[in-house]
């Protein structure tokens, strides 16, 4: 499964190219490729194309991102799919292709010139070109390689990669949480006004207009579920409430639904400090998924359900490293920073070694890449003079160094593999430090959320007692 998006950029070409060719993200540029331009000369060649065709203004380049489901694809296959995609969809466009492995999911980037080098015409991006070309080609290539496809059908039924990914992992999304709350409120409501009151109790702000909009307090944007499901429009909600009342009157539905009794959190005897705090907080987030009336959670805590997996990962990290107190956290950070510094030092030494041999490594790459051009030149094909000259220059450089090509190739492979391994270790240590910082920041908010939730629970119990 690949999720694609295209971005139009009016900024500097070199910034976009340098970003996707980052060695830390591409295993020291092993996972990179070029179409219609030479490595190291990409930006200059694209600018020359713009000058030659007098198309210097407007969008400078386009940036396509192709993201894959975690664990579904290898970096090499992702790069191959991106290269095939570029060859088919971007014929005549100079493009730089790179596959990044620095995150939890493998994703490929394609930065290409906004001007076609063959025709001089500018690329035009719109919804039609996206769904009929970019999305269609990407989905077809995924199917050909046995990968799943996120969705098919109309554009209005599409969803974001993050939303699809959370759904595939059975994790809540804002949309699924909102729809669940809407269904619960519809089932409990006596009329439309009562429905709006119940949604407000759940922490939602409501926008009335042509379509009903809902957002949790603290969110930036309203969501309009009636766009995708007419049952959540104002007319659909009113009809559903009336239908529920009719079923109650005819005895087809119980007037009161059984709900689990709310039970306060009991301290876990095994954990203290950070671990106890995380157990309590994860317990609260789990209780939110159970139906409560009136709701006991704050709007902020309702949104925190989205981070349940993140908090569970942090808890597992604390338990695995036996971190309970602030002092233990500080000691762990110090050890990790020392390990990271040693790894960085090793990488610097290896990069110096690589830099000394870079000219020979480049000559090896040129000799391999330009071998077909050399054969064409020797067969009398015109236009191969520059490529043949570069090939011969690489051969002479390798002959002068006195090291057999086989040994040099083996040395290059070892250096690049060691660098890739070091980069992976560095990323791992940096993630550990990032987790420590996240935990220290999150713990303060957790304590505040727990205090507010417990206070709200006492208020709800007091109100219920007064009603009785």
Image (cartoon, helix red, strand yellow):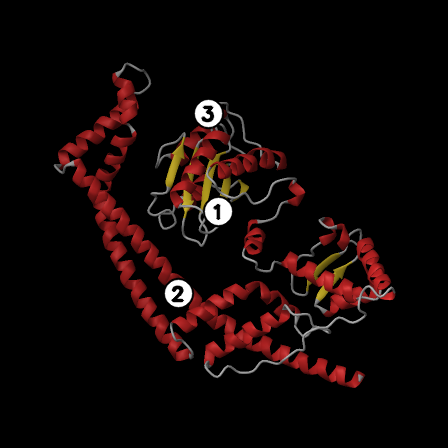
Residue lying farthest to the left in this orientation = 402
Determine the residue positioned at 24% across, 48% down. 415
Examine the rendered structure and indicate whether residue 48 appears above or below residue 259.
Answer: above
Q: CA distance from mark 2 to mark 3?
A: 50 Å
Front disc: 2 or 1? 1
Residue lying farthest to the top in this orientation = 380
Q: Nearer the viewer, residue 131 or 207?
A: 131
Q: Please tell me in which quadrant of the rendered image residue 342 appears.
A: bottom left
Graded by Cα atoms within 10 Å as few (under 14), some (14 to 19) or many (20 or more), the crowding at tag 2 reads some
Residue designated by label 3: 52
Q: CA distance from mark 2 to mark 1?
A: 24 Å
Determine the residue positioned at 46% across, 25% down. 52
Front disc: 2 or 3? 2
Image coordinates of residue 125 in percent, x first then y, are 58, 35
Examine the rendered structure and indicate whether residue 23 appears above or below residue 220.
Answer: above
Task: Return the mark for residue 107.
Answer: none
For mark 2, give the secondary structure.
helix
Q: Please tell me in which quadrant of the rendered image residue 413 appears.
A: top left
Image coordinates of residue 284 in percent, x first then y, are 59, 74
Q: Earlier in the sequence, mark 1 or mark 3?
A: 3
Left or right of 233 on screen, residue 30: left
Image coordinates of residue 214 in percent, x first then y, are 72, 59
Quadrant in the picture for the C terminus: bottom right
Image coordinates of residue 309 in percent, x first then y, are 52, 64
Q: Earlier in the sequence, mark 2 or mark 1?
A: 1
Graded by Cα atoms within 10 Å as few (under 14), some (14 to 19) or many (20 or more), the crowding at tag 1 reads many
Residue designated by label 1: 68
Residue designated by label 2: 432
For mark 1, give the secondary structure.
strand
């Amino acid at each position: 499964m690949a999720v694609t998006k295209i971005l139009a950029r009016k900024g500097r070409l070199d910034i976009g190219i340098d970003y996707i060719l980052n060695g830390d993200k591409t295993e020291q540029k092993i996972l990179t490729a070029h179409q219609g331009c030479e490595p190291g000369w990409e930006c200059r060649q694209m600018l020359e194309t713009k000058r030659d065709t007098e198309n210097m203004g407007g969008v400078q380049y386009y940036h396509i991102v192709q993201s894959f489901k975690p664990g579904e694809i290898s970096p090499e296959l992702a790069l191959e799919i991106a290269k095939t995609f570029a060859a088919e969809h971007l014929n005549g466009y100079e493009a730089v292709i790179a596959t990044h492995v620095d995150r939890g999911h493998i994703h490929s980037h394609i930065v290409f010139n906004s001007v076609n080098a063959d025709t001089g015409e500018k690329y035009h991006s719109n919804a039609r070109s996206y769904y009929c070309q970019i999305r269609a080609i990407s989905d077809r290539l995924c199917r050909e390689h046995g990968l799943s496809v996120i969705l098919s059908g109309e554009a209005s039924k599409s969803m974001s990669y993050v939303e699809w990914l959370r759904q595939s992992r059975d994790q809540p999304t804002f949309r699924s949480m909102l729809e669940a709350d809407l269904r619960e409120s519809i089932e409990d409501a006596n009329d439309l006004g009562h429905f709006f009151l119940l949604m407000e109790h759940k922490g939602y702000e409501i926008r009335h207009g042509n379509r009903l909009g809902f957002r949790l307090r603290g969110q930036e944007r309203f969501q309009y579920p009636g766009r995708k499901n007419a049952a959540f429009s104002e007319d659909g909600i009113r009809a559903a409430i009336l239908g529920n009342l009719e079923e109650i009157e005819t005895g087809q539905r119980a007037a009161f639904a059984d709900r689990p009794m709310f039970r306060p959190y009991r301290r876990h005897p095994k954990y203290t400090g950070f671990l106890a705090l995380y157990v309590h907080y994860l317990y609260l987030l789990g209780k939110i998924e159970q139906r409560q009336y009136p709701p006991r959670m704050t709007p902020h805590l309702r949104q925190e359900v989205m981070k349940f997996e993140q908090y569970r990962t942090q808890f597992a990290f604390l338990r695995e490293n036996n971190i309970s107190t602030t002092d233990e956290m500080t000691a762990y950070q110090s050890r990790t920073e020392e390990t990271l510094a040693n790894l960085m030092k090793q990488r610097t030494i290896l990069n110096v070694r690589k830099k000394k041999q870079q000219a020979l490594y480049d000559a090896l790459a040129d000799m391999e890449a330009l071998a077909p051009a050399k054969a064409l030149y020797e067969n009398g094909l015109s236009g191969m003079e520059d490529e043949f000259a570069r090939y011969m220059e690489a051969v002479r450089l390798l002959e002068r160094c006195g090291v057999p090509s086989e040994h040099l190739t083996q040395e290059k492979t070892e250096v690049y593999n060691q660098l890739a391994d070091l980069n992976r270790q560095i990323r791992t240590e940096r993630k550990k430090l990032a987790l420590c910082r996240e935990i220290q920041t999150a713990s303060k908010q957790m304590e505040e959320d727990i205090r507010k939730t417990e206070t709200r629970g006492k208020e709800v119990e007091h109100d219920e007692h007064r009603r009785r």
